[in-house]
């Protein structure tokens, strides 16, 4: 199974342990699902984490480790298709990641379909 997690979910995962966002993040880190992301999301993670709210709650090393983990372990989608359907145009890239990740799964040999075919 391949998922796209909203940037706020990822940041929330770092703030409070034991919450649903934290559990999702840990499930991914333990290999229970594949995370799909893109450089646009990593840019957003870095940008949003510089806001005072997050700077008061998270260290630069926590953000850096998350960005590095995602870049190293997630399915990084590039290029992203043009998507313009979200009520918040700033979230269109997340829908583009989901579309690209599905295309990756379908068209790349070994792209993630398991033996039963229920990725």
Image (cartoon, rainbow, N blue to C red):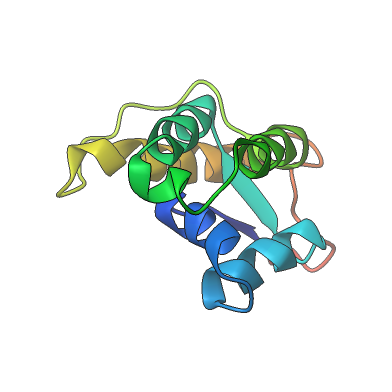
Q: Quadrant of residue 27?
A: bottom right
Viewer can see residue 107:
no
The quarter of the rendered structure image containing the N terminus is: bottom right
- In x, y percent, where is residue 21? 54, 68
Q: Identify which residue, 98 or 15, lies in the foreground.
A: 15
Farthest residue toward the front?
56
Q: Identify which residue, 47 or 53, lies in the foreground.
A: 53
Please tell me whether residue 28 is drawn above or below residue 62 in the rendered image. Answer: below
Residue drawn at (65%, 34%) of the image? 64
Residue drawn at (36%, 50%) of the image? 53
Please tell me whether residue 101 is drawn above or below residue 32 in the rendered image. Answer: above
> Tag count in the figure?
0
Residue 93 is left or right of residue 115, and the answer is left
The quarter of the rendered structure image containing the C terminus is: bottom right
- In x, y percent, where is residue 79? 50, 20
Q: Quadrant of residue 8?
A: bottom left
Farthest residue toward the left?
87
Residue drawn at (71%, 33%) of the image? 68
Residue 109 is left or right of residue 43, and the answer is right
Q: Identify which residue, 1 or 57, lies in the foreground.
A: 57
Viewer can see residue 31:
yes
Residue 79 is left or right of residue 104, and the answer is left
Q: Quadrant of residue 63?
A: top right
Residue drawn at (63%, 79%) of the image? 18
- In x, y percent, where is residue 107? 65, 35
């Amino acid at each position: 199974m391949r998922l796209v997690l909203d940037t706020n979910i990822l940041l929330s995962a770092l703030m409070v342990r034991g919450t649903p966002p934290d559990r999702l993040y840990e499930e991914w880190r333990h290999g229970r699902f594949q995370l799909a992301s893109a450089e646009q999301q990593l840019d957003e993670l870095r940008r949003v984490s510089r806001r005072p709210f997050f700077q008061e709650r998270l260290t630069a090393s926590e953000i850096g480790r998350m960005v590095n983990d995602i870049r190293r372990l997630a399915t990084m989608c590039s290029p992203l298709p043009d998507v313009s359907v979200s009520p918040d145009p700033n979230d269109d890239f997340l829908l583009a990641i989901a579309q690209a990740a599905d295309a990756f799964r379908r068209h790349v040999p070994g792209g993630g379909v398991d033996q039963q075919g229920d990725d």
